[in-house]
Amino acid sequence: MGSRRVASENSSGRPAACSHCASGRFVSWGAAHGLPRYRCTDCKRTFNILTNTPLAHLRNRDRWLTYVGTMVEGRSIRGSASACAVSPATSSRWRRRFLNCTTEERARVIGAVIAAFADSPALAGAAGENSANLTWCKELLPVILSWLA
């Protein structure tokens, strides 16, 4: 595998460069799955904040905060899976991918997930059909932020 190019962010929350070719010339290109997308004017490819990170193509982003909280607590893969209402195979995959993230990627991704799901009913404590109960994540946020360091 070649080296990964990761879209780093500037202070406005937009990536500083294309994740594919590192060009700084890109435009907003709508949103997909709650995250803003961008299109590079040089290579014509689209990307978002998760492109070329270990967390690309993972689903159930609304449950990631809960999962990170269970990792910080030191729960087992099965314990984390039951807390997030996912299968143990998904829990194992998430653990591997989260641990493969660099500190910069962790901070950027967790920030993006918090921003994308700030208005989510799951963060308000409503246990919906497909949402994990994330009320305790608000209390664990300082611990999660220490995990990012």
Image (cartoon, rainbow, N blue to C red):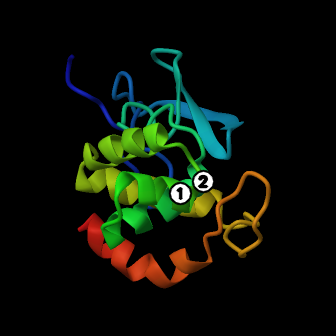
Q: Position of residue 32 (x, y in %)?
A: 68, 36
Whole-percent x, y for residue 143 in the image: 35, 78
Callout 2: few (<14), some (14-19), or many (20+) C-alpha neighbours within 10 Å?
some
- Can you see residue 16? no
| Residue at the image point whose x is 68% and y is 40% from the top | 33
* Quarter that holds the N terminus: top left
Q: Are marks 1 and 2 in contact (CB under 8 Å)?
A: yes
Foreground residue among 87 and 28: 87
Dot 2 corresponds to which residue? 85
Mark 1: give few (<14), some (14-19) or many (20+) Cα within 10 Å: some
Q: Residue pushed farthest bottom?
A: 139
Q: Is 94 positioned to the left or the right of 38 in the image?
A: left
Q: Does the image show residue 82?
A: yes
145 with respect to 90 (left or right): left
Type of amino acid under label 1? Ser
Asked which secondary structure carries label 1, the reply is: helix
Instruction: Say how many tags the image has.
Output: 2
Using the numbered discs, state the Cα–Cα distance from disc 1 to disc 2 in whole angstroms.
5 Å
In the image shown, does 89 or 120 lie closer to the viewer?
A: 89
SS for callout 2? loop
In the image, what residue occupies the spot 35% across and 22% down? 21
Vertical placement of 87 versus 3: above or below? below
- Residue 67 position, x and y percent, is 46, 59
Of residues 21 and 103, the one nearer the viewer is: 103
Q: Is residue 11 above or below residue 41?
A: below
Label 1 sits on residue: 82
Using the rendered view, name the quadrant where residue 120 is placed: bottom right
